Amino acid sequence: MAARRNTPPRGEKAAMKRSENEAVRRPDTRDDATPWKLYNRLIEGIPEDIAVRDYCLGMHWSYVEADCGMGVSFTCKGGARRACKQDLRGTGLREMAELAKSWCFEEATLGVAALNAYYARKELLDPLGATYDEPIELPDGTVRKMDAFELYRPRIEASERKNVTVVGHFPHVDRIAEYANLTVLERNCSQELDTPDPACEYVLPDTDFAFITGVTIINKTAPRLLELARNATTVLVGPSVVMSSVLFEQGADALAGSVVADPEKTRFAIKNGAGQFFGEALQMTMIERDRA
């Protein structure tokens, strides 16, 4: 005779889930006179009636799929130990987005992906004047995709001052050194151009153009970096960028992120570590602050 599962009555199960989810809620982060203001504003913008359907913390990238759509984020490792260990499928997307405030960076990864499940949608981005990448096949067979650095190159070259700071070592970032004074701030320095990221306090106040990886939203350095770069033209770059105009209120001038164009391919790529399919599954997009 098969063993029966000791399943609590419906009301008890719901109460148990709320109790478990105390590991998600962070009541000590509600003070908007602190850098948590950015995260609180992003989370509060998500309606309460949207449920999480599925999620995956992948080796390189992660996703959260909700009733409204799918969002992705770079998988950031390290930080504090994981405290949220329960199954979050079926919980509210807004509640899962609270994980963006976790000091466990794996949890924060899922929180940022949850934020993008809501904000990185064309129905929200189109009214903000979003432009989308339309890949162009070049004569040599390679495909050219939207590149925030190349899009800003004419503005940098036309600028009297050309001090450029890039937070995060992006592919081919060294090309910027051909037409500007380049500083690359990197946590794990491995390339000749890399400068340890604590130098941000010294470099960013005097920079003219700042390109900041969206991973800084996960590791909580974004509020300070945006403050330090307040005199620069500042662009947040990468799939982890939360595509919300709330970031314009914090000092960003443009957001160069992504929307999920093919959810099925995104799931496959993340679960199987297939990076080439991940790139194909996303459509790069950009929104800029309205200066009118």
Image (cartoon, rainbow, N blue to C red):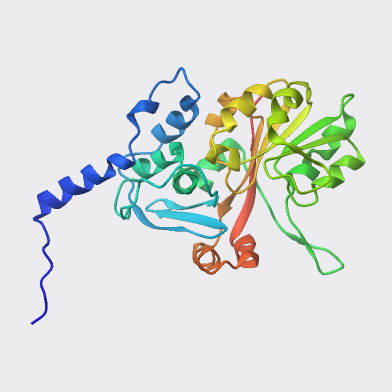
Left or right: 77, with 182 as reference point: left
Left or right: 93, with 231 as reference point: left
Q: Residue at position x 80%, y 45% from top? A: 150
Location of residue 179 by image quarter:
top right
Left or right: 4, with 285 as reference point: left
In this rendered view, identify the residue nearer to me: 132 or 96. 96
In this rendered view, identify the residue nearer to me: 135 or 225. 225
Determine if residue 292 is in view. no
Asked if residue 23 is positioned above or below residue 88 in the image, the reply reads: above
Location of residue 183 by image quarter:
top right
x and y percentages locating residue 75 in the rendered image: 54, 52
Asked if residue 268 is positioned above or below residue 192 in the image, the reply reads: below
Q: Residue furthest bottom?
A: 1
In this rendered view, identify the residue nearer to me: 251 or 118. 251
Q: Residue furthest front?
A: 81
Asked if residue 73 is positioned above or below residue 136 in the image, the reply reads: above
Identify the image quadrant of the N terminus.
Answer: bottom left
